Image (cartoon, coloured by chain):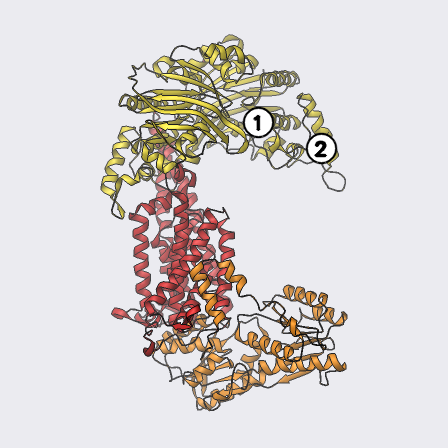
Chain colours: A orange, B red, C yellow
Amino acid sequence: MRNLLPRRALAIAVPLLSATLFMAACGGSDDDSPSGGAATSEAGGLVAIITPSADNPFFKAEADAAKAKAESLGYETSVASHDDDPNKQSELIDAAISRKAKAIILDNAGADASIGPVRKAKDAGIPVFLIDREINATGIANAQIVSNNAQGAQLAAQSFVEAMSSKGNYVEFVGKESDTNAGVRSKGFTDVISQYPDLKQVAKESANWDQQEAFTKMETILQKNRDIQGVIAGNDTMALGVVAALKAAGLNGKVVVVGFDGSPDAIAAIKAGDMHATALQPAVLGAETAVEQADKFIKTGSTGAEEKQSIDCELVTEENADEFGVFGRK
Amino acid sequence: MTTTTAPAPSEHDTTELAATARRLSILNGLFELRAFIALAVLIVVFSLLSDSFLTVTNVITMTKHVAINAVIALGMLLVILKGGIDLSVGSIVGLSGVVAGELLQGMSIGVLDVVAYPPVWAVIVLCIAVGMLVGLVNGILVTRFRVAPFIATLGMLYVARGLALLISNGATYPNLGGSPALGNTGFGFLGSGRPLGLPTSIWLMAILAAAVALLLVKSPFGRWLYATGGNERAADLSGVPVNRVKTIVYVVSGACAAIAGLIIASELTSAAPQAGETYELNAIAAVVIGGAALSGGRGTVRGTLVGAFVIGFLADGLVIVGVSTFWQILIKGAVIVLAVMLDQGQQRFQRRQGAAASAAAAVTKPASH
Amino acid sequence: MTAVLRAREVTKVYGGTHALKGVDFDVAAGRVTALFGENGAGKSTLMKILAGIERPTTGQVELDGEVTQPRSARDAADHGISIIHQELSLCPNLSVQDNLFLAREIRGRTGAVDRAAQRAATTAVMRRLEEPIDPDRLVADLRLGQQQIVEIARALLQNARVLIMDEPTSALTAPEVAVLFRLIRELTAAGVAVVYISHHLDEALEIADDVVVLRDGALVATAKARDVELSWIVSHMVGRDPDALFPDREPEIGEPVLALDGLVVADPQNPHRLAVDQLSLTLHEGEILGIYGLMGSGRTELLEAVAGRITPVAGTIELGGEPLGTTGIRDRIARGIALVPEDRQRDGLVQTMSVGQNISLAGLARFVRGLFVNRDTERAAVSKIISDVTVKTSGAAAAIGSLSGGNQQKVVIGKALLTQPRVLLLDEPSRGVDVGAKADIFALVAAQARRGLSVIFTTSEAEEALHIPDRLLVLARGRLVGEFRRGQITREDLMSLSDGGTAVPTEARERAR
């Protein structure tokens, strides 16, 4: 299912064979450098794409989609990640300003902490298009395009309730508790599930969005109580940890597992019957929309849309799993 | 011109000093057991709070969870005995899993345009070799280039994590089950096999612990290691190959971390490049709770295992009892600090005990030399 | 005569070592009290207690008749007690003035350091010491003697009522010592009490008004300086007739074993300086060769080069006719060279290991069978060594810290002997060891030499240098300045020779040839 890119094979062969770790580090780091220099058209100019991290498939899909779209529209791109560090985000925006970027596509590092840097870019005459996460201010960014977490959570919870036939014991895994989305999703789940008195929450744990932690905690919860019919998790990574724990306990396929995000691994698990459903965040669509609006703004001075735009999540189940690719419809 | 002699001590002083020495030795005995006491207290408290804590299956499950940290901690113990620290183990856990993922999904061999599917045993050997390689770099940085262990292994923490991300391209490898057609099935055995009724990881922990204990207690290397950690200059002047000892401990630590990474990847039948983040801290905590001195030269396998059990049972017990996540984090921190405070207390008592005992001895036979 | 500062029944226990055993000690205003004692007699410990650096285990310190145990060096300084340390306690990375005013900086109105005022005060105190050192120079750039003068200047600046000088002249030249003595006289005339400790007994006796002798941590004699002579001091320091301590021996000297030719060793701390300069010597089978040299004479670097710790810059080392090349410690131990380092705490012992494990550490290879150490043969060899070198311990499993200094030294020697060496190198083996253990150690060395072991030992104690070795070499500033058979040289000649050419250099060298 995965493509075997030659570069990846090289990246593993280098440390194994030549033992020169630093060479490997240099050899593979082409993501951060601006690309398409030769392909600059007269429309041209730089689009800076800044996302939280490169080691998360979701953010990577987002960045890849924005990069591909911008390059197809004739722009140069630079892709960087701020690791959820507002200070690093600010530095990256400074860099974009000094390189006279035409637009910044930003998945920001905090609803309040990002207001200043975004305003700084605006003051420098560079339009900013926010994706995935909002900031607590309007009129600064040119667009804020986010997926509707509350709607997605309700969608997932609805499907969960149906699969559970509205009754039974269930466990909820919450994401990193300091993350806004963790709270929004958990509330979305609760809003739906609390309407069904026969659904009983027997445990609620945070697993910090992490697979191994969800695995360990699920195993422990099963030690306390095997009478569990469903698990709903704030993201797919935790849901997949739960699936592994259920397999180890011989309960796979007997427990309804629902996740959130629509990651390729989760979709594969749904196809395999290990997971029931996930709410897919259309990261690709959001990123592409942001780049299209940036292009329109650069050319016409207007995006032609409201600042705040929300994109609905889509429910992925066994029936429609084949229709979806990496964080978007195929 | 006057000449005087040293005053003779009184009877009273002698008996008092001897009594102090005795009292301190009893207290010291209690402190020696402190990690066991902490573990016993945890078990009693959680058993009272939940019926499902002290059951055979739960103890096995918890021990399985403990095993991952314990395996890393055994390697860390060697590094800490040397007086160093290895911050790169968490990243090696991630790197090892990713390499396993890459190999199990087929490794294309550069010029030949062939995709190789190595058998599982070869995958395991190669992953451990990768861990040892990172450890070797740590060792060379520390010995040849005189980089402080904290800095060298901090650097390798980032390098190894970066490599894991580069190899995986940031993505998770799903379905590490292999396929019968390619002859590379069986990887799941490490995480979910149960030879003789116990999970494989528990066996691995037991075998590694026995091997490390044997190494420390019986082999000349063990003696060299304790000497190097206790006083590197004295060890060097006694002909101990100090640099070789220092390098080997990092290599072993890297191998242990790689094994832990394989267990995790096997349990989840998937490998994520970010696996193992902050695991180095859990391993250090286990070693320290087990009574090892961060300054080197002092520590045992038994203590480290107990330390790993304290941390693991505490984490799982809090989940079973249903304590909120924030409290779980806070309580874990408090237990670590408490354990180290007890350790400092013990060292103070040992010093006072030594002083009191020798004072008593000297007073009774002043001609000792 | 009034005592400003007195110690009352002071005892101090370190681990298993009794540094002080109930000492009464008075310091009188306006007088110089010279404190005598061998290494390990407790002089430095007593001074550290008076200066607030250490706390007594029992007993108390009285200042002006009131019990005041200084809580720290700072507290003692506030009470008017200053100390010039035996080990230099300067920060080499800071300038002279920063060191002089460390933790007592002169502050301007804004609270910032008033560097101009500090610089003026520094220049003034340096003028008093007749040593024009730039206040802004780094201490690291000064030579050892100048550093010692900075140390003295720091104590002077504190306007102390009691000034303790622990080996203040170990690195000074004769003219510098003369300046210091004049200054001490000025201070006592102004009512300052001075405590003076020096290895140079005659020098100390010259400046002293009162004499106090410590031995094995106890005060054994006090006198007025004008009433006593050097021999009185020595006999009280040693506690018996010096000759009885060092029994005569009839050496059986065999063939040459170790030969050094033109050896040049750089100072590891300061590669621009040569610690050992063009040194050649030959050691014979069964011979005990003494090397007399003060701190910084290059004696430690010489032994470490032979043991393989330092690689020499030039010259050859031959063992049994074969050149050793640049092999390391491990190889030299295997070939039969064993070193007992000068600082046993820092270089000799592993405190976290037991007595037995320390003893077997260097010779562990002998007990390895297959993968593991054979603990039965190890245990047997260790207990044989413990009885051979007469370590007083409860057993091989005892903690190192439970032993006295002398017994710890015997453990280090035992460790070296367990490697079955042909050549044993002892760097100041009697440092910090009480008299009884010292006699044991030298008896042990003599017994080993009778069995054919060749020994080189270094010492900075004239008594040892004169009585122990079959042949004595005098080392000063990395060069051999004299060679004598036993009984060929007097204490006075030895002292002036070892000053390395400050007192009577040419004459002494000629006499040496």
Residue C466 locus on image (x, y percent): 40, 15
Subunit of label 1: C
The residue carrying mark 2 is: C118
> What residue type is disc 2 on?
Gln
- Secondary structure beneath dot 1 equals helix
Q: Is residue A122 above or below residue C256?
A: below
Q: Are marks 2 and 1 in contact (CB under 8 Å)?
A: no
Does A192 sit above or below residue C265?
below
Q: Is residue B70 visible?
A: no
SS of the residue under disc 2: helix
At label 2, counting other C-alpha atoms closer than 10 Å, the crowd grade (few under 14, some 14-19, many 20 or more) is some
What percent of the width, then of the height, locates residue B218?
A: 28, 48
Q: Nearer the viewer, residue C72 or C242?
A: C242
Q: Quadrant of residue A282?
A: bottom right
The image quarter in which residue B103 lies: bottom left
- Across and down, in percent, residue B88 comes to 47, 58
- Find disc 1 in the rendering and name its residue: C144
Q: Nearer the viewer, mark 2 or mark 1?
A: 1
Q: Earlier in the sequence, mark 2 or mark 1?
A: 2
In the drawing, what numbered circle is on residue C80? none
Could you say where residue C108 lies in the image, as x and y percent from the top left?
A: 75, 38
